Amino acid sequence: MLNKTSLLLAICLLAAVSVVRSATVTFDCAKVPNICSNDCYAIQCKGKPTTLHRDSENSSLHRTQNACKSPNRCSGNPDDSNSCDEYPFASSQEGGAGAVTRCVPAHENSVQGGTLSSFYSANSIVNGDAYTVAFTSTAGLQYCSSSCTNTGNELIRKDDHLQSRPNFTQYNRREFLTDEGHVITMFERVTEPRSLDSLIGTKTWLAHEEREVTIVASKD
Ligand SMILES: *[C@@H]1O[C@H](CO)[C@@H](O)[C@H](O)[C@H]1NC(C)=O
Ligand SMILES: *[C@@H]1O[C@H](CO)[C@@H](O)[C@H](O)[C@H]1NC(C)=O
């Protein structure tokens, strides 16, 4: 018979690991390159979190608090940049003042809005629930690799609270493989090396295909 203590320990370890395993939404950057660029810049260059909490209640309020504003600052632009995107998302508790914004094509913004709401319902994410953001097909996107040189298209509304906080979270970019060969790009806190390894064996939701795949290995 299995030793009771080790069984108990195994259960405790599983419980501890499951805390990290919030549902993951993976955006296909081949479909929404401008949005991925904005999200990656926010995370990698401005220390915005990769774990967000749904807050669809305050979306409109959040949009008025960040540099998109209302009416949005991009609306007079040509088609390739007439919609304003923000990260963290307006529909998250982390959204609002201090969010990183970029003018993107309206169709990318509607693709992302649609995939987020499908993700919420497919994974039963209600207001207050945590989820993780990841990316695939990031090749060629400067902010999703290691560059943080703002080429002029990223804007953050100045905010006293943020300015008085010089230190922000720093991330390492890491890649994982899914059972179907997709490469998933994720950002891991430098203070928590290998913490994302706990995601191996869990599912990630491919936003562009509206279905789940399993993360099977780390690429490094
Ligand atoms: C919306 O914002 C209010 C005020 O900050 C907050 O109390 C409430 O919890 C937020 N709603 C959600 C779903 O997080
Ligand atoms: C910022 O980080 C540095 C290095 O870890 C530390 O020495 C400094 O005290 C921090 N500053 C603040 C305001 O937290």
Image (cartoon, rainbow, N blue to C red):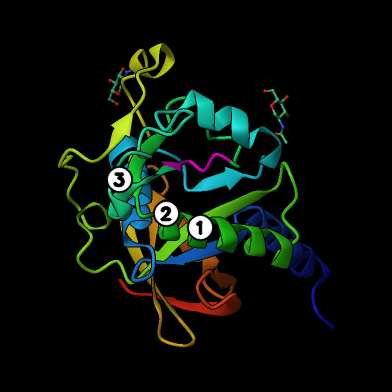
- Residue 175 horizontal side relative to residue 15, left or right: left
Q: CA distance from mark 1 to mark 2?
A: 6 Å
Q: What separation in Å lies between label 3 and label 2 (alpha carbons)?
A: 19 Å
Residue 85 lies, in percent from the top left, at 42, 44
Q: Which residue is mark 1?
A: 110
The disc at residue 41 is 3
Q: Which mark is residue 106?
A: 2
Q: The residue under label 1 is which amino acid type?
A: Ser
Q: Does dot 1 land on a helix, a strand or a loop? A: helix
For the record, the magenta segment spans 86-90
Q: Where is the N terminus found, in terms of image quarters?
A: bottom right
Q: Position of residue 109 (x, y in %)?
A: 46, 54
| Marker count (numbered) | 3
Task: Give the label, 3 or 1, closer to the camera.
Answer: 1
Residue 2 drawn above or below residue 133: below
Q: Are marks 3 and 1 in contact (CB under 8 Å)?
A: no
Q: Secondary structure at mark 3?
A: helix
Q: Amino acid at mark 2?
A: Ala
Q: CA distance from mark 3 to mark 1?
A: 20 Å
Q: Check disc 3 and give the amino acid type.
A: Tyr
Q: Are marks 1 and 2 in contact (CB under 8 Å)?
A: yes
Q: Is residue 138 left or right of residue 126?
A: left
Q: Earlier in the sequence, mark 3 or mark 2?
A: 3
Q: Is residue 210 above or below residue 81?
A: below
Residue 151 at x, y percent in the picture: 15, 42
Q: Name the residue located 72 percent from the left edge and 58 percent from the top edge.
A: 15
Name the residue at the bottom extreme. 180
The reply to whether residue 190 is in sight is no
